[in-house]
Image (cartoon, grey):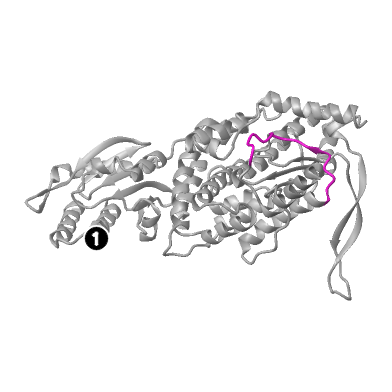
Amino acid sequence: MPFQKYIEDVQKQFKTGIAREHAYRPALRNLIHDIMPKITAVNDPAHIKCGAPDFILQNARKLEVGYMEAKDVGIDLSKTEKTDQLGRYLESLDNLVLTDYLEFRFYLRGEKVEVVRIGEIVNDEIKALPENYDRLKTLLLDFSAFQGQTIKSAKQLAKMMAHKAKLMKHIFYNVVSDKEHDSSLKDQLKAFQNVLMHDMTEEQFADVYAQTIAYGLFTARLHDKTKDDFSRSEALLLIPKSNPFLRQLFSYIAGSELDERVVWIVDALCEVFLFSDLDEILKDFGSATGQNDPMLHFYETFLAEYDKSLRKSRGVWYTPEPVVNFIVRAIDEVLKTHFDLKDGIADKSKIKIEVEEQAFDRRTKTGLAKKEIEVHKVQLLDVATGTGTFLAEAVKQIYKRYKGQEGIWSSYVENDLLPRLHGFELLMASYAMCHMKLDLLLQETGYKPSNTTTPPRLSVYLTNSLEEHHPEMDTLFASWLSKEANDASWIKKNMPIMVAFGNPPYSVSSSNKGEWIQGLMEDYKKGLNE
């Protein structure tokens, strides 16, 4: 009998008087495999310090069906239920068992549904309760047959994403703050500090990284034509080619270099998308060209569940949609009336500008050369684009003029819109959201790139708008960030931006005070005093 052997194994360890919770895990793993032969119980001590449950149960398809958290024999599980750790698990993990190896508590979607005990401690001995064996077996078989809840609405998906991302943030923080073990994530944090946010803390890094993975996976799933499977590796192939940085990031997320302590939670988030009914969810995004911005409401729902305080601390303040609409229409009118551009923000006229480019000089073996190029006259830039509300509104208003002319719309987008529509964003999660929003919006308008293998990238860059140039760095991830920032620097330096629009700054003094912008501010102050 599996249960009799299990109790004997637990009793053997218990009698030593020095056994702790880890000593009983082999017995529990053997019981799981005896009762549920088609289930694999993964117990990796490397996860423990990171905050993962002690056991992750996978079926034959390598899909996670449930989680077990094991405490020492005789521990008061009612007190464990009140800990922050279990609170995070109950909020984020749909199918969980908490046990002290004798009592088993079953939780379904955060609610305790069953409790069963198969042994108790009497006079320093473990006394078996065989009358409960069959009940525990039934509960374990039901536990292993769990299938994720089908997600049918965007609101429901935003909440599920937030719960997983919240736990992911905690795990990432534990990894990068671990002083004893190295991690490629620590190198990435240093790259962020060097290139984007010099004062970024470990907690802030964990936050933006978790959100970015959540929205990167969501972006990939929205482009998935095979609905019956979804994984990290598949996500890499599905990230739009119009966003090269996010694709490069996911080459790390999908590969073998991903820190093993965070693999399980990324895979768990993939399962959220696997059990999402995309046909139903996409109905919520079917009005992107209309007045309301569905992605905006999706992100607000996500933030409310993920971290209510984040909106204020990160300055996530949205200009009301009617105000955005008015500002873009006003810009359009000013271009027509004051600049004599009859097509306003849809203008296609071009001008010639002189730019610097690297050139070979035989004497110095390096140097810069002047080059004349032709660019569009009406260049639009949102210097702190966030989730892309203003850029999207510009696309919507221009698209209205092409209704009934869909045959030329794709050509116009590729040749006369994308080359002059720019956005800079400092926060990686908002950056990913902006790309996703614009990609979905352009799809809905009927835009199809002329070359699907190498479509033009969206000119939205992950960069600090208040810094200029970044030297190439030695780590792969840092080089991706540097290239992204330096491509944006080319626009800052060379592109004759005619329209800078977006959400106005509400803070008197920004905490984003890089050397370059501080130097410009000193020149400005000096000019005022002269």
At horizontal 89% and vertical 28% (from top left) the residue drawn is 336
Residue found at the far bottom of this picture: 363
In this view, the residue in front, 168 or 382, is: 382
**Image quarter of residue 48:** bottom left
Q: Can residue 133 be seen in this view?
A: yes
Q: What residue type is labelled 1?
A: Ala
Q: Which image quarter is the C terminus in?
A: top right
Given residues 304 and 138, the one toward you in this image is: 304
**x, y percentage for residue 96?**
34, 43
Q: Residue at x 83, y 29 (%)?
A: 332
**Residue 188 found in image quarter:** bottom right
Name the residue rendered at 59%, 36% in the picture.
Answer: 316
Q: Residue 93, position in %: x, y? A: 40, 42
Residue range (magenta)? 494-509
The residue beneath circle 1 is: 23
Query: Does 111 lie within the magenta span?
Result: no
Side of 265 relative to 413 (left or right): left
Of 173 and 434, nearer the camera is 173
Circle 1 crowding by C-alpha within 10 Å: few under 14, some 14–19, many from 20: some
Q: Is residue 108 above or below residue 129?
A: above
> Is residue 153 visible in the rendered structure shown here?
no
From the viewer's perspective, tell me whether residue 145 is left or right of residue 189: left
Estimate the x, y position of residue 1 in percent, counting from the top left: 18, 53
Tell me which corner region of the image, top left, top right, bottom left or bottom right, holds residue 286. top right
